[in-house]
Image (tube, rainbow, N blue to C red):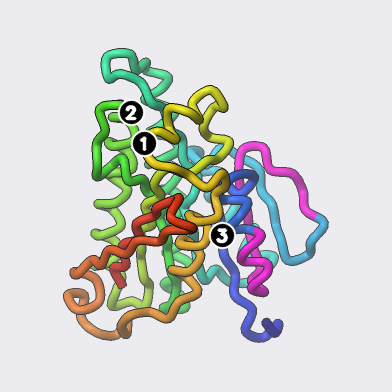
Amino acid sequence: MSERVRKVVVVTGGSQGIGAGLVAGYRRQGWAVVATSRTIVPASDADLLTIDGDISDPATADRVVEGALERFGRIDTLVNNAGVYVAKPFTDYTAADYARAVGVNLAGFFWLTQRVITAMLERRSGHVVNVSATLADFADSQTPAVLTALTKGGLASATRSLAIEYAAHGIRVNAVSPGVIQTPEHAPESYDSLAALHPWDGSARSATSSTASSTWSRPRSSPDRSCTSTAARARAAEDTVGGLSTTRASYLG
């Protein structure tokens, strides 16, 4: 991709799992990447800017957007990938569990997306991809995870709202909802029980592919059309790699 048309993506949770796969995938496509996570390390690649910090802190969102604009001059896509998964019986959740899940899954999305959309509005162009979770839509008695349902379900609702709000401004908002994906977020001792829910492929590649393709694919409709025609009708698609891992993607713009 030439310097003149090079696009820029911000990926949260970019140090491991799906996020690390997204960073590598976007770089292969020639995009400049801003990756952030709590423990991310500096990069030697001039087109990869890494910013460490707590995504639930508004100050981290400020540093990410300021860094992206200072280094690359624009933000074309934001992938809100950072998330925490805490599976416990409802009555076992602690105040710390609640604060951690809400902080990363909701506050992290909120503060960064607010700042990124502000920057996108100046160019009347942009794309936000929110990584949700199928557990928010399909509860399973073997995997009690109400904090995931609460926070990721809220993220899905926010996706629909933002898609309608900003469709006429040239900004698309999509959600991708991974199924059972093996990433470092899951402790090794949980692999057997999680694999029993749905076989997985041992990597995050299916979720990475589905998330990134929602950016690389051509928009379904013109952002200049009405909010109803561009955003109100969510479409669901299944992405299966070798029949092993499933990801649902909702395209709202």
Q: Earlier in the sequence, mark 1 or mark 3?
A: 3
Q: Residues within 10 Å of mark 3 (few under 14, many from 20)?
A: many
Asked if residue 115 shows in the view, the reply is no
* Residue type pointed to by label 1: Leu
> Of the numbered discs in the image, which one, if any, rests on residue 10?
3
The residue depicted at 24 percent of the width and 59 percent of the height is 161
Q: Nearer the viewer, residue 183 or 132?
A: 183
- On residue 232, the disc is none
Q: Residues within 10 Å of mark 1 (few under 14, many from 20)?
A: few
Q: Which mark is residue 197?
A: 1
Q: Position of residue 248 (x, y in %)?
A: 34, 57
Seen from the viewer's position, the closer of residues 246 and 123 is 246
Residue 52, placed above or below residue 196: below
Measuring from the top left, give residue 198's x and y in whole percent.
39, 41
Q: Describe the element under mark 2 as helix, strand or loop.
A: loop
Q: Position of residue 24 (x, y in %)?
A: 66, 60
Q: Is residue 9 above or below residue 146?
A: below
Magenta-colored stretch includes residue 237? no
Q: Tell me the distance, in whole angstroms, between the alpha carbons under discs 1 and 3.
A: 32 Å
Region rendered in magenta: 24-43
